[in-house]
Amino acid sequence: ITALQHCTMGDSNMASATVKIAGVVALYWFVSISMVFLNKHLLSNVDLNAPMFTTAYQCVVTVATVAVLGYFRDVAPFFNQFPRFQYKPDVAIKVLPLTIVFVGMIAFNNLCLQSVGVAFYNVGRSLTTIFNVVLSFAILGQKTSMLALGTCGIIIAGFFLGVDQEKSAQTNLTFLGIMYGVLASMCVALNSIYIKKILPLVDGDMWLLSGYNNANAAFLFVPLILMFGEWGEISASEDIMTSAYWLMMTIAGIFGTAIGLVSMLQITVTSPLTHNISGTAKACAQTILALQLKDEARSFMWWLGNIFVLGGSLAYALVKRREMEKATSNSQSNDSGKSAV
């Protein structure tokens, strides 16, 4: 009877864990895909052509969200991860180099999303891994194995094939849209490098860094709004006077914060590798959904380009994971050898 009880409890725990993982992955997919489609609507389907203003407002929402979550840190254990956010100018200045890169990242991301279709969006920003390898070597001196470089070659091939086939599909793909995607990819890679440098300045607190980063960005977007001539667009817009517009803008901003939270949650209940696999599958589902919603079809070669990009990115993650495990194993073996001596 005891053995049977243990077996039943084990099955129950396994079922509970499976449901929890499935729920977290589903939440990650929902937030990520919804955020992309909502931003695409705000950037392309309203009468306000002001991507810098849209991005700036979402930064303000992120700061407000982090501050509100920090306010409840003593209410429940879940909120303990959020700091009580206070904007200190001396800390903000130290974070500024990262913010400049961050502004480039989110600005070019939204400009790319405005200029290309959601179906092409993942391919358009697929060179992040390539820039990560190049910039890590140029800035940090980190070398990449030949096997990992081989997966990068697959991604590059997929990018160029995807661009060629997207043009052949007679979409409104422009050179500017492609360049926005390339620049967004470069800034994403730079952002990850600078985070490693700046994070110790805020005691390793990612949420505190997010608060300062977005607060700084909100200020930096003001001259960009003026430079892009968006003030005239803002004052002439009719949509900006509606509550529905501001509701969608606010939800998009909250989702921008939520994606960081659900990403960490997914990594916690699964693993970094599973998170990468989930992200790859999500990108595929997002592409299919975008085509279905517009009732569009693409050629076999177009899909092959997507497969190269997604497959190459996943292969790179697998290779780097294996190399990290090997390095950790070798380090532990060396430590054991020293202890034995």
Image: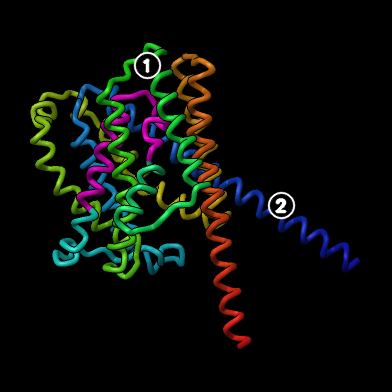
Asked whether 131 falls inside the magenta stretch, the response is no
Q: State which quadrant residue 339 falls in.
A: bottom right
- Mark 2 residue type: Ala
Asked whether 117 falls inside the magenta stretch, the response is yes
Measuring from the top left, give residue 188's x and y in whole percent.
33, 45
Closer to us: 7 or 280: 280
Closer to us: 324 or 28: 324
Q: Which mark is residue 167?
A: 1
Q: Is residue 85 left or right of residue 10?
A: left
Determine which residue is flagged by label 2.
15
Secondary structure under tag 2 reads: helix
Q: Which mark is residue 267?
A: none
Query: Above or below — where is 280 with respect to 61?
Result: above
Q: Residue at x 48, y 38 (%)?
A: 30
Answer whether residue 76 is visible to the viewer in this image.
Answer: yes
Q: Residue at x 40, y 64 (%)?
A: 81
Measuring from the top left, give residue 340's x and y in whole percent.
63, 86
Secondary structure under tag 1 reads: helix
Answer whether residue 244 is visible to the viewer in this image.
Answer: no
Q: Is residue 122 left or right of residue 40?
A: right
Q: State which quadrant residue 97 falls in.
A: bottom left
Measuring from the top left, give residue 32's x and y in whole percent.
44, 39
Measuring from the top left, give residue 178's x and y in whole percent.
31, 27
- Mark closer to the chain start, 2 or 1: 2
- Extreme residue in the bottom direction: 341
Q: Residue at x 14, y 47 (%)?
A: 220
User: Which quadrant of the figure contains the N terminus?
Assistant: bottom right
- Mark 1 residue type: Lys
Q: Report crowding for label 2: few under 14, some 14 to 19, many 20 or more residues within 10 A (C-alpha).
A: few
User: Which quadrant of the figure contains the C terminus?
Assistant: bottom right
Q: Residue at x 27, y 57 (%)?
A: 211
Q: Which residues are magenta?
A: 99-127
